[in-house]
Structures are given as structure tokens and as C-alpha cells.
Image (tube, helix red, strand yellow):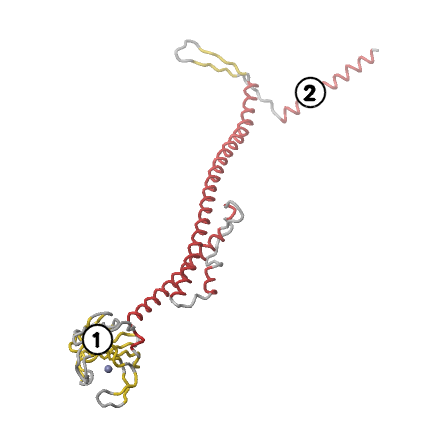
Amino acid sequence: MRWLFKAKIITSMRIMSSMRESITKRQRLFPQIKLKNLKFLILREGHSGLRQFDLSGKAAFWGLIALLILTPIVFYFGSQLLLETAYAHRVAKLRKDNATLHRLVERFEDRITVLQREVEALSETDQDLRVHAQMPDINPGIRQVGIGGTMVEVRTDMDYLLPSSDVSLASITERLDALYRSVKLEQLSYEGIRDSLKNDLARLRSTPSLLPVQNGKLTSGFGLRRDPYTQKYDFHRGQDIKVRTGTPVFATANGKVVAARWDSNMGLYVKIDHGNGFRTLYGHLRRIGVLEGQLIERGDRIGESGNTGRSTNPHLHYEVRLYRQSQNPINFY
Ligand SMILES: [Zn+2]
């Protein structure tokens, strides 16, 4: 029994010594910090006396540790929250802008469709006018230039900003380009029609299409006839219209007076160049009312009928020539 007790004491002593050894080892590794208790004295304005707070050194130490750990955590989550709020705000603004962009693009599409219809209507009118102006229609292949294809490289990587897959910036640009080409084509076509009509109008104005005297009686027509002087067969280059002397004589088309003078055969006569190869002649006049070089219009009074030159009775000798070839005047009124 004694032995046993002794042994117990020895064992406990050993344990104690080993504990002491471990404490000194720890102290060597982590020298113990001597923490002093802190005292805070607060002096308040308007109050007499001091207030005192005691803070144990240990509490201050752990407080400082907690502060060091918590500060970055709070900072991290706080900044995250701020960033997320800012991001949400930005996304909301982008969504709004995007919606506006969608509406704009859709409106563009609608307007392009309307314009395409307008151009188609213009094209139909153009074809109609060509029929009336007796002009050939535009080659269908040329009309096709207004369809498809694009002249500029289009960025399609921005299409994700658009509302639906059936709308693309490339297709809008393509349609606009096609529209531009169609309008250009129509413009050229209409200019052609205008020029053609202008020419037609000029040709119409320069084509004799009137009787040079009113209430006349045709006495000798165009072609072979017996000459009233020589009684030999001769080619009559114009028409003889029997009228009383002094009957007003009118120009049968627009033109320029190239002769207004005396000729032993024609007597007093007027010759007018109408352009496009047409010339008219008015002979045996009593009086001339125009000057050589004068510009005149259809229906202008150029003189009075008479019986001058190689003429047997009062009448008007009227000639129409096309490129110096005598024409039957009957075809020109
Ligand atoms: Zn004659």
C-alpha cells in the first residue's frame, strides 16, 4: 500500500515536470504578451467629474483581432452590394435603350416597306408612260438591279441587340440599298420619258398640220397635171387653193422663215423651215407679213393671198417638203 502511494506521487511529479517543460517551450515560441488593463476617462462638457471605463487588456486584444478580421469582410460584402446595385441600374437603363432601339428598327422596317410599295407604283406608272410614249420597256434584268445585294459591308455582330431573329441590320441595309437603286433607275427612266415626250412635242409642233387658208377650194392637186401656161404635162409639187385675193395666209407649223421674197415663177412667196426635215412654201402672195429669219408659230399670219408670179387666177400655191422631197399636202391637215 505504501509503495503504491509512493509510485503515484512519483508519477504525478513526472507529469508536473513534463507540463512545466511544455509551458516553457511554448513560452519560448510565443513569448507571452503582457496585456495591461486599459482605463478610459471621459470628460464631458458641462458636467463636473469624470466617467471611467475599464477595459481589460484581454478584451482589448480580442476586440482588435475581431476588428482586423471583420473590417475586410464587411468591406468586401459592402462593395459587392454597391456594385450589384450599380449593375442592376445600368442593366435597367440598357434594357430601356434597347427597347427604344427595337421600336426604331421596327419603324425603319415599316417605312422601307411603304417606300418599296411607292417605288413599285412609280415603276408601274413608268411602264404605262412608256407604252403611251411608244418607248420600249426597261429590260427586266435592269429592273432587277433594284432587288437584292448590298453595297456596303454590314456588321451583323450587333444583331443580338435587336428584338427578333427575323430583323437584321444586314437585311435593313440591303433593302435600303435596293430601294436607292430602284429610285435611281426610276429617276433615269422618267428623265428618258420626259426627253422623248419633249422631242415628240417638238416634232409635233414642227409637223405641218393645218390648212394655210380658210374657206379655200382645191383647184389643182399634187402630182402630174397639164401646165396651165404651156399645156404640157408637168409635176405639180403642191396644191393650188382658190381663194379671194387678200385672204390671210397662216403658217401651218412652228418654224423659222428662210425665204420671204419675189420669184418670177412663185411671185411673192414665203418659205418656212420647221425643223425635223419639214419645210413649207406659200406662193403667189399679194403681200408678205414676215421677215427672213423670223421665228413663227403655227397659226401665225404670214401674209395675204394674191395672183403674183406665174399665176393665171387668184390662188395660194402651198407646198410641203420633207428632206427636200415634195409631199402631198393633203396628208398634212
Ligand atoms: Zn401651184
Residue of label 2: 20
38 or 18, which lies in front?
Answer: 38
Q: Residue at x 77, y 14 (%)?
A: 9
Query: From the viewer's perspective, is residue 204 above or below residue 95?
Result: below
Position of the C terminus by quadrant: bottom left
Residue ranking furthest to the top: 48
Residue of label 1: 257
Asked which secondary structure carries label 1, the reply is strand
Crowding near the residue tagged with mark 2, few <14, some 14–19, many ≥20 C-alpha atoms within 10 Å: few
For ligand 1, give the image quadrant.
bottom left
In the rendered structure, find residue 302 and report the number of the disc placed on it.
Answer: none
Q: Quadrant of residue 267?
A: bottom left
Q: Residue at x 82, y 13 (%)?
A: 4
Count of picture labels: 2
Q: Quadrant of residue 233?
A: bottom left
Residue ranking furthest to the right: 1
The mark nearer the N terminus, 1 or 2, is 2
Residue 252 image position (x, y, % from top left): 25, 72
Q: Quadrant of residue 277?
A: bottom left
Residue 105 image position (x, y, % from top left): 46, 47
163 or 83, which lies in front?
Answer: 163
Position of the N terminus by quadrant: top right
Q: Residue at x 53, y 16 (%)?
A: 55
Residue 129 image position (x, y, % from top left): 39, 63
Mark 2 residue type: Arg
Q: Please indicate whether residue 58 sits to the left or right of residue 2 in the image.
A: left
Residue 276 image position (x, y, % from top left): 30, 75
Mark 1 residue type: Val
Q: Are marks 1 and 2 in contact (CB under 8 Å)?
A: no
Asked which secondary structure carries label 2, the reply is helix
Query: From the viewer's perspective, is residue 226 above or below residue 195?
Result: below
Could you tell me how far apart the alpha carbons at marks 1 and 2 are, in whole angstroms? 146 Å
